[in-house]
Image: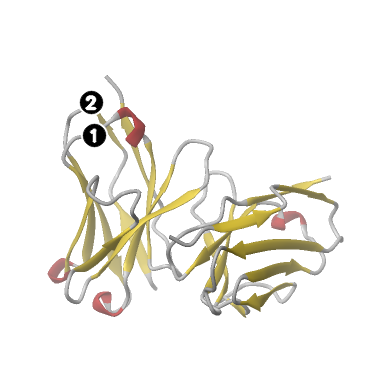
């Protein structure tokens, strides 16, 4: 069974760093790109960027380039999304997607 | 960056009726367009890929059409579980803003 299992909810303060994860199983992890998608409270889906786990090649939406970093470790079939300095406006649900399979989402709350 | 515009923003229909949702791209995306269904509190679910192919487990009442810049998702006879928000996405990148399909 194909699964993408994301790490748990996070509560952080502005300026803090964060890395969330997405572990793939039940398929060849290096055969499919993994995308990250943001959904702010009550809003639509926003594509942030994606990674090819076979070689860690990435491409980002211009809206998110420079604000987040996407990475992957194929040895443990896990993709990551990280921030070096969070802002309150980063509060959202974040999904990883294959894209025919999606993770359950990770809620990130940034508040002082 | 390619922009996807969905219409209408909200569609109010009754069970048994036919739903037609539109997605227009600012430039050609060939047939690289997908449709997703999202219900409250759930992750999106792939409905249609490559403009007209139903994803695994999607009922035959869902169909997709179009190519280039104009695409349509049709639900032939609405079931209660079909009421949700639908998003289009091009080339596994940008999404449209969504169409909320609500019960009339």
Furthest residue in direction front, as rendered: B27
Q: Position of residue B14 (x, y in %)?
A: 85, 52
Q: Secondary structure at mark 1?
A: loop
Left/right of residue B68 with respect to residue A26 in the rendered view: right
**Residue nearest the observer in this picture, B26 or B40:** B26
Residues at circles 1 and 2 in contact by the CB criterion of under 8 Å: yes
Q: Identify the secondary structure beneath mark 2.
A: loop
Q: Is residue B32 above or below residue A10?
A: below
Is A39 situated left or right of B18 in this image?
Answer: left
Between the residue at mark 1 and the residue at mark 2, the CA separation in whole angstroms equals 7 Å
Residue on which disc 2 sits: A13
Left or right relative to A109: residue B3:
right
Q: Earlier in the sequence, mark 1 or mark 2?
A: 2
Instruction: Say which of marks 1 and 2 sits in front.
Output: 1
* Residue B21 on image: x %, y %: 72, 61
How is the structure coloured here? secondary structure
Residue B91 picture quarter: bottom left
Marks 1, 2 in one chain: yes
Q: Badge 1, how many Cα within 10 Å: few under 14, some, many 20+?
A: many
Q: Is residue A61 above or below residue A55?
A: above
**For mark 1, what is the residue?**
A86
């Amino acid at each position: 069974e194909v699964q993408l299992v994301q790490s748990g909810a996070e509560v952080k303060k502005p300026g803090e760093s964060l890395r969330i994860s997405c572990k793939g199983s039940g398929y060849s992890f290096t055969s499919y790109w993994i995308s990250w998608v943001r959904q702010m409270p009550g809003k639509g889906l926003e594509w942030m960027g994606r990674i090819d786990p076979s070689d860690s090649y990435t491409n980002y939406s211009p809206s998110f380039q420079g604000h987040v970093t996407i990475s992957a470790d194929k040895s443990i079939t896990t993709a990551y999304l990280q921030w070096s300095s969070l802002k309150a406006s980063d509060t959202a649900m974040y999904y990883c997607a294959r894209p025919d399979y999606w993770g359950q989402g990770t809620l990130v709350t940034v508040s002082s | 960056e390619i922009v996807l515009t969905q219409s209408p923003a909200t569609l109010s229909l009754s069970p048994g009726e036919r739903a037609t949702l539109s997605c227009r791209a600012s430039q050609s995306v060939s047939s690289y367009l997908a449709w997703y269904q999202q219900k409250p509190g759930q992750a999106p679910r792939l409905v249609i890929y490559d403009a007209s192919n139903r994803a695994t487990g999607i009922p035959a009442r869902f169909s997709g059409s179009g190519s280039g810049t104009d695409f349509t998702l049709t639900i032939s006879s609405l079931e209660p579980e079909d009421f949700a928000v639908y998003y289009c996405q091009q080339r596994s990148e940008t999404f449209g803003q969504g169409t909320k399909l609500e019960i009339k």
